[in-house]
Amino acid sequence: MPPPATRRANRRVTPSLAEWAKCLGPDGYFYYSKHPNAPHYIYDKMVGGLVDMAAYAGNKDALKWLSKITGWAEKNLDRSNKYAFGETEWYTLSENFTAPTS
């Protein structure tokens, strides 16, 4: 049985996750609008939240939804390794989508 803190966290996040999941498109589209600002950044934050829900709250559905939005992201997010904000911040998310070469 998970520790009490994990059970409490799961009770808190499960309803929110279930409601959020109802907003996902059939293809895994998860943004609020059709033209999101900073889509890579938003995806990165969603990944962190879903991983935390799985790791710290023991919520297994979080991994299912992570897989769904990642499927969409792999097909749709730009992987060209551009700077995020001019030439001041390197955004490395696209490196995370690159298959290992070995």
Image: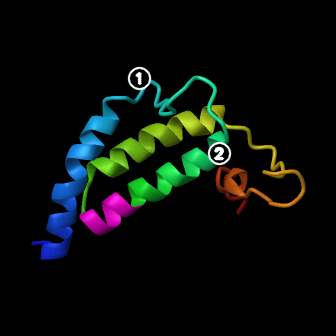
Q: Residue furthest bottom?
A: 3
* Distance in Å between CA atoms under marks 2 and 1: 20 Å
Q: Is residue 53 left or right of residue 14?
A: right
Pointer 2 residue: 40
Q: Secondary structure at mark 2?
A: helix
The quadrant of the rendering that contains the N terminus is: bottom left
Tag of residue 73: none
For the point 14% across and 66% down, the residue is 7
x, y percentage for residue 95?
72, 56
Which amino acid lies under the numbered mark 2 shown in the image of this protein? His
Q: Which residues are magenta?
A: 52-57
Question: Which is the main secondary structure of the residues drawn in magenta?
Answer: helix
How many C-alpha atoms fall within 10 Å of the one at disc 1: few (<14), some, or many (≥20)?
few
Q: Nearer the viewer, residue 36 or 74?
A: 36
Left or right: where does residue 2 sit relative to residue 87? left
Q: Quadrant of residue 76?
A: top right
Q: Position of residue 93 (x, y in %)?
A: 67, 54
Quarter-wise, where is residue 17 in the image?
A: top left
Tell me the residue at 63%/26% (across/down): 35
- For residue 20, above or below residue 23: below
Helix, strand or loop at label 1? It is loop
Q: Which residue is mark 1?
A: 26
**Residue 16 image point, x, y percent:** 27, 45
